[in-house]
Image (tube, grey):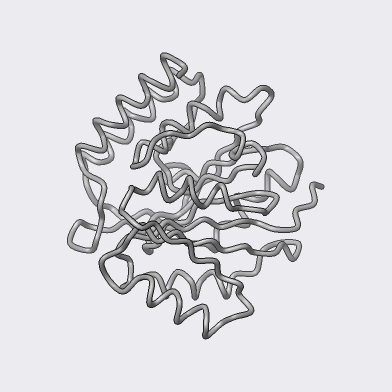
Amino acid sequence: MVKIDTLSIIIPVYNEARTIEQILDLLRELCLVNNIGKEIILVNDCSTDESAHVIRAYARRYPALGLRLLEHAVNQGKGAALHTGIREATGDYLIVQDADLEYDPDEYNALLKPVLKGSADVVFGSRFMGGNPHRILFFWHSIGNAVLTFLSNMTADLNLTDMETCYKLFRRDIIQGLKLEEKRFGFEPEVTAKVARVPGVRIYEVGISYYGRTYAEGKKIGWRDGLRALYCIFKYGLLGR
């Protein structure tokens, strides 16, 4: 059994005032297996709404939670926010948590299971395997995700079912040892390609739930991000940059 003292939870935030408090409630109430501690790092990517104000008020209300809020002076993108959070993390392992309500933190323990057994260094949470709830939304998004995952697998020599998932759990020294460049949604294919090249890395996949949003509900990723993902798969996967 692998001992983990602290899990770092990195939350990129851009205009999520409507949902961020609900996510923080879920994290506050979350009990991690084996009494693992939580380090919660929020990176405000120059939100134009009340996100920062809501987070600061929440931190004052629950000081024992030890929230850390980092600020970007200008908007740089989700990937850049993740770079900032990853750099500041101190936990044994690290997981990415979106600030919306599409993913359920209750499933952290399922992602931690292969790590605690001593089998995994990196765990992807797949929205497309297992019998977990999955909101039915956009046909072309699902096709795009399948194509991107297939191409990523082909260039990285993996057999993932969901490369674009938010839930990726990393051993901290591994993720902090990668030179990450993508500042927007290209983070996913880039980090997948680069972590696959880490000598001896053990990558697992666990089925998770998915409560997706529509664009009217605040979803931000679009077709341009899909084109960038294709470029990133070619650059970091096929060319090995």
Residue at x 25%, y 55% (from the top left corner): 219
Residue 23: x %, y % from top left? 45, 69
Residue 103: x %, y % from top left? 43, 58
Q: Quadrant of residue 204?
A: top right
Q: Which of 39 and 213 is in front in this view?
A: 39
Left or right of residue 117, residue 73 in this image? left
Residue 9: x %, y % from top left? 56, 57
Residue at x 52%, y 44% (from the top left corner): 168
Q: Nearer the viewer, residue 72 or 202?
A: 72
Residue found at the very far top of the displayed protein: 239
Residue at x 32%, y 36% (from the top left corner): 145
Q: Quadrant of residue 80?
A: top left
Q: Which of 165 and 24 is in front in this view?
A: 24
Q: How many labels does the image show?
A: 0
Residue found at the very far front of the displayed protein: 73
Residue at x 58%, y 75% (from the top left corner): 29
Left or right of residue 71, residue 204 in this image? right
Looking at the figure, which quarter contains the C terminus? top left
Residue 134: x %, y % from top left? 37, 53
